[in-house]
Image (spheres, grey):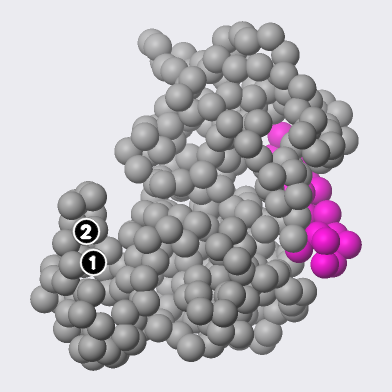
Amino acid sequence: MNLKVALQMDPVQTINIHGDSTFALGLEAQRRGHTLFYYEPKHLSMRDGRVYARGQALTFRRELDNHATLGAEEVVNLGEFDVVLLRQDPPFDMSYITTTHMLDVIHPKTLVVNDPAEVRNAPEKLFATRFQGLLPPTLISRDVAEIKAFREEFRDIIVKPLFGNGGAGVFRLREGDENLASLLEMFGSINREPIIAQKYLPEVRKGDKRIILVDGVPVGAINRVPAEGEARSNMHVGGRAEKSLLTKREQEICDMIGPELKRRGLIFVGIDVIGDYLTEINVTSPTGIQEVDRFNGSNLAGLVWDAIEARR
């Protein structure tokens, strides 16, 4: 099987070859004989029902500072491709949402991974709230009085943008912290979206686990331990990755959400778990497969491609 694969992603020149999941997926695609074409979301267009992109043929290699060879720029009809990997990073804003509407036109004849309509309908923090009993106490609101009351009830909370990513804009507010009002003013000056507030989970000091699911089945996990003095566990802000296996509770969480992920065509998903609680379901551009592979000697990109090829 030789597939024509388009990668809709952020600038290829800036990726970290030791951590980027799109890079791993691209290398595995090449190993299987598939060809790659690369374009950025800003070069995606639609005219009279035809969806096309301006980009370049791409070859990956695992060489630092020499990881990509690009062909001559050309315009291609994405409807003639077998697969499009929807891999640009959030923020999940109207620009991102618009690309999912455009890719809807060619899916599923051209298989878009993840399904663009379901990506649009399952923003990570909101989607997780559909699974009752799995989240810590959580409030989604713009109402200042409601947010203040939530903090008064739980005393120690996390607030963050509803559609943010990578730990940006995440704040821990303890009881008596006088910054809540000004913080809400700042959020309100940036956009009109609600914020998400959650009870602070002290278990995060032991780690925030990233679990990878392929076709709704958990296939690997890493534990991300925050740096001293840091409330966030994201690796790019100093979090430390550790080898990890699934606990009984984490397997229960996966069993509860997995069938719905598969039903929605969400092939490659990363969920975040702190202690006994699910906190996010990442469907837009999940990461973590290289870190899991290094600890486990696995090939998670291969499992993703197995799932894709089974649909072609």
Q: What stretch is highlighted in magenta?
A: 292-312
Q: Which class describes the residues within 10 Å of circle 1: few (<14), some (14-19), or many (20+)?
A: some
Residue at horizontal 48 percent and vertical 22 percent from the top: 44
Task: Judge from the rendering whether residue 25 lies leftward or rightward of residue 168; answer left or right.
Answer: right
Amino acid at pointer 2: Met
Amino acid at pointer 1: Leu
Marks 2 and 1, how far apart at CA: 5 Å
Task: Judge from the rendering whether residue 145 lies leftward or rightward of residue 156; answer left or right.
Answer: left
Q: In this view, does 201 lie above or below 279?
A: below
The residue that label 2 is drawn on is: 186
Which label belongs to residue 183?
Answer: 1
Q: Is residue 300 magenta?
A: yes
- Mark 2–mark 1 CB contact (< 8 Å): yes
Residue at horizontal 53 percent and vertical 87 percent from the top: 203
- What is the quadrant of residue 223 in the picture? bottom right
Front residue (pair 71, 120): 71
Residue 301 picture location, percent across and down? 76, 49
Q: Overall secondary structure of the magenta stretch?
A: helix
Residue 290 picture location, percent across and down? 75, 55
Front residue (pair 28, 153): 153
Q: Is residue 155 above or below residue 186?
A: below
Q: In which quarter of the image is the N terminus?
A: top right
